[in-house]
Image (spheres, rainbow, N blue to C red):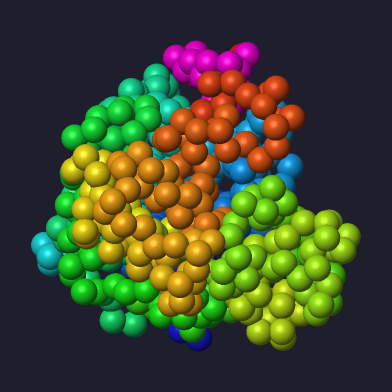
Amino acid sequence: MKKNRYHSYLYYWLIALLLFQVSCKSLDEDPQSFVSPQSFGNSTSQIEAAYAASLNYLWRYWGGYGYGYGPFRHDDQLAGGNLNIGLDNGDGLWRMHYGALHNINNAIASIKAGNVKGATDEAKDLLLAQGLFLRAHNYFMLVRMFGGVPLITDETPDPIANPLPRSSIADVYNLIVSDLIFASSKLPESWTGEPGKPTKGAAQGILAKVYLTMATYPLNESSNYQKAADVALQVIESGNYSLVPGITDVFKLENKYGPEMMWSYNSTYDDIATDPQIWAPSVYADGGWGDAAIDTTFEHGWPDQVRKDAYLLLEWEGVPYTDFAEQTPFCKKFFFYLSEDDFNGYSSTMNWPVIRYADVLLIYAEAANMANGGPTDKAVDAINQVIDRANNYEENPLHPKLSTAMSQADFDAAVIQERSWELVFENADRWFDICRKRILDQVTARPDYLANFSEDDYLFPIPEIDLNLNELLEQNPGYSN
């Protein structure tokens, strides 16, 4: 399998670091034989190596989001989320995103300074667009988890020597929007032989989600509904993406760069994902580890349909999940569609979707409904494409298609529910939907958890170590310093 070019450059970057470390131990070494910090970023390959390194913070073997779903356990999908949110919840995510941003900002600064040798202006714009896309993605994750955060860019003086306070949520979003608008104007519609790199459509898809989030909590700027609808419609009408027709084929490995997957964290045999056993119950194959169980209340609320069996592991070889040792269902998406040899060999090459076409259809449906005071024909068509596939293109009275006769509120609630089922376990989408719609107390999986609920639960705590090191930072409400 061909490696993603970013992953190929990651090894170049690591070798450069290793050579630099070795050189520090031997003062007699010829300095021309390694890439120094001063000269790093002077070529296209080095810039892309920095981007690869930034992605390695976010998705790696036993690290990043490869084993980082725990902080989002307090949604209504994962088992065990009791709304007791500890002071260390999200600490690792904070660190990995700022680690990624360090690499990205250094690369952006090098491009803007004109340090990249032998590159045309068009090539530099393309490099810059990739960096701004990645920076926007990191800040979009951070601002939804923590609220306003220190806004470190390529123009920021050393943030260690010059600590920064938290920027406003609006300022963080302004940077995200600006970065994504530039990225979408410069990125190509596809990459020949490099399927894992961000595209114009991926930038537009995430921008549509950004606008949708800005229309809801905490900014509540309703004018952004129309912006979200407009950008999502551009993706839909581009003709570059489509749903995988069969619901049982969506997460097959041959479709991980298919017409539906717009941008993902990538895995290859050279750079595998975390062992797939974490996603599987102990009864599965040679034995899973049961690390990521689904809450049974969430499963009970999911109507019977083909998609439910495609996305959730409800039984294995005739044994229902109620008889598993864990007594819970599991999410099929990230292990079931691997080959038996790969599963037993602990070699997962699954990708983690960040934005896919089904998501864009649902973004459009929600935004168009809210922008127009009720569901439009196009909004209904968008969500019904997702529902129709979920039911294997058959009428299902337990999960019927939507219509323009619905009220704005009912249609909106149906879209949010559809997102929960279609995007289950993907990139913390359910947690972020719960937070921006302020419905945590309505959807919490178990009534006894409500005793732990607070309006402060919609933000993670700022890590204590950062509060101790930077006196300009303030903790989020509800968490003691």
Q: Is residue 395 above or below residue 193?
A: above
Prevalent SS, magenta region? loop
Based on the picture, tell me whether residue 225 belongs to the magenta stretch.
no
Where on the picture, by quarter, is residue 167? top left
Q: Residue furthest left?
A: 121
Q: Is residue 127 above or below residue 192?
A: above
Classify residue 86 as left or right of residue 117. right
Quarter of the image with the C terminus is top right
- Magenta extent: 462-480
Depth check, front residue: 301 or 96: 301
Number of residue marks: 0
Q: Residue at x 62, y 71 (%)?
A: 309
Depth check, front residue: 126 or 111: 126
Based on the picture, tell me whether residue 477 belongs to the magenta stretch.
yes
Q: Residue at x 22, y 63 (%)?
A: 235
Q: Residue at x 25, y 30 (%)?
A: 221
Residue 327 x %, y %:
83, 57
Q: Residue at x 43, y 58 (%)?
A: 354
Residue 177 x %, y %:
24, 42
Depth check, front residue: 433 or 470: 433
Where on the picture, by quarter, is residue 273? bottom right
Classify residue 461 as left or right of residue 221. right
Residue 445 appearing in the image? yes
Residue 78 x %, y %:
66, 48
Residue 324 x %, y %:
85, 63
